[in-house]
Amino acid sequence: MFKNVLLTSLVGLACVSVFACGALGQNSAAPEPAAGIEIARHEQEFSSARIEPARMDGQAGIAVLFTGTHDLHYYASPKTAPAPGFELKVEAKSAAFDFSKAVFPKWQIITDPVGTKVEVYAGDFTIFVPITVAKAQAQTGAADVEVKITGITCTSLLCLPPFEKTLQAKIDWRDRDSWRQISLEAPGDTGAAAPAAAGPSYATWFALTLAFVAGVILNIMPCVLPVIPLKVLGIFEQARQSKARCIALGLSFCLGIVLFFAALAVLNIILRLGYGTVFQWGDHFRNPAFLVGMAMLMVVLALFMFGVFTVTPPSSIAGKAGPGKGLAGSAAMGFLAALLSTPCSFAILTAAFAWAQTQKLPLATVAILLIGAGMAAPYAILTSIPSLLKFLPKAGRWSELFKQTMGFVLLIVAVWLVAALPKARSNAVLYFGVILAFCVWMWGGWVTFSTPAARKWVIRTIAAVLAVAAGLWLLPPGKADAIDWQPYDAARIDGAVKQQRPVLIEFMADWCLTCKAVEKTVYARRDIAGLIKAKSVLAIKGDTTLRQNPASVDLKELYREPGVPVSILFVPDKNEPVRLHGLLIGAELKELLEKLPDKK
């Protein structure tokens, strides 16, 4: 009995040993997946990624495996990402391999809070990076592979800061036949647009309704409201004999109004087709130049609403607003009524026309015509029901207050547009907005109707030159992104210094005017930015705006500096960094950068 038990135990032990050895042998041949890293996290939402070698359709490569919750998503298309370049990007590099472009899976379609269809990746998904060439180093053993992942993540409530993550792993090319097989569902081009929604969206109908309402609002502007009863009474005088004649003349008058807006629609078509002014939905709000231009336009229009300046048609045109005769004359009166409404409706018309420029051509045309229909609607009603004339409100202080209220609404829109800009650029735009408002005030408030022409010309020339100079100074094209600034990270700085990589830290604060001057006079220079890139300098932005910021703490406790601005340059093979204080550091910084070795 004892011998049987002992024999059974030995046989079982032998089987376990053989199984274990087989498993160890199998594991030694199979690739070992790299440890994953967390890409982003907000409360209960998260997403992480890891890489491992894989095969797809007979092609060897690297699989990037994402795992996370469904509400936290990445953007698949540059056209619908929150800003240009923020779509999900995956790039692999290795001394032993050459890689082709990443192959992305089929995206998902979500509807963002403003009703736009957006292509995203969310939850669990895989991206494949094919290997095109295995070099000689790959044949000798395990080789290092690095995968860089960049983009931005958002939830249904907010967007997290843009990220750049790096994954590293070792893969053995000799074991490629045992790499795991994967497949992607309908790989697609991430640059393609999202499928169009069936039928018009609620946002489109809402915008068209607002266009009609905007046309109605034109009739209650201070310089338009008194015109309505006069024009309608003129029609009644011509049509005493017949109500049908009155209605016909009233419709002709309305047609004249619509013709004025039809002329604007034709102008819009000429601009779009003749000059190629074509926008995809949402693209204009991702263009910093468009955002800046629209924000400043809203500021100027708000000043118009406040009465800082006025826009009047030539007296030769305004003087022709006398009563017309017949249907043609009534239509001409309507056209002139719309034209003469421009002094008070200038802001609304300009804003509506600018919006129409950003829509598809048929929608833009319909929107502009609907503004005309909205303005004509009260005339059509009043000529059809003359008894309503006695209920019209008289122009007075209430209408002027309404106009000024609309000015504050325009300022809110301007702030919203500026808030969509990168922080480094939005501050400069706010400063420029104040200077532009001052220049507009000079233009309209420093002169009167009786001001001599020469003096008026001098004042307005100074205002225009000051506005242009401020724009050239505060809004230089492309300079805000000349240096690839990275957020302050003490661990990253220490790692770069240990690797003998030069590191430049600019300590600044939003409330520091001297820091703004350093940005413009030093770090906006092309030669400085070029040297930072050529020498592979890690550029760090140390934001000390708030006391609890990590950069604020280290500036005081680690670097023992009393305040900002200060720039610190870590030079390889030197124990102590170079410290640059004050405003005039451009020449010294350039000399230090030139002495650094070129990047390998």
Image (spheres, rainbow, N blue to C red):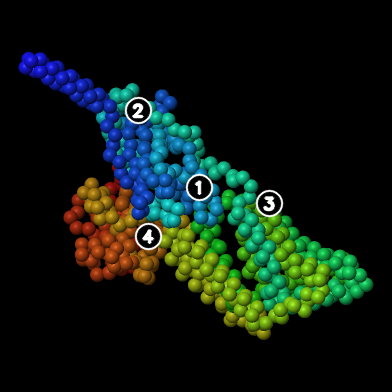
Q: Position of residue 365 (x, y in %)?
A: 69, 55
| Of the image marks 3 and 1, the number of the one nearer the N terminus | 1
CB-based contact (under 8 Å), mark 3 and mark 1: no
Q: CA distance from mark 2 to mark 1?
A: 31 Å
Q: Position of residue 346 (x, y in %)?
A: 66, 69
The residue carrying pointer 3 sits among few (fewer than 14), some (14 to 19) or many (20 or more) residues within 10 Å by Cα, namely few
Front label number (1 vs 4): 1
Q: Nearer the viewer, mark 4 or mark 2?
A: 2
Q: Residue at x 33, y 59 (%)?
A: 541
Per the model, the C-alpha gap separating discs 3 and 1 is: 26 Å
Could you say which disc has been placed on residue 362 in the image? 3
Tag 1 secondary structure: strand
In front: mark 3 or mark 1? 1
Q: Earlier in the sequence, mark 1 or mark 4?
A: 1
Task: Measure how far apart labels 4 and 2 are at the Cα level.
Answer: 48 Å
Query: Which of the labelled discs sits on residue 110, or is there none?
Result: 1
The residue sitting at 75% across, 66% down in the picture is 376
Q: Is residue 560 left or right of residue 381?
A: left
Q: In this orientation, does residue 136 appear? A: no
**In what element is the residue under mark 4?**
helix
How far apart marks 1 and 4 lie (CA) works out to 40 Å
Which residue carries the number 4 mark?
A: 523
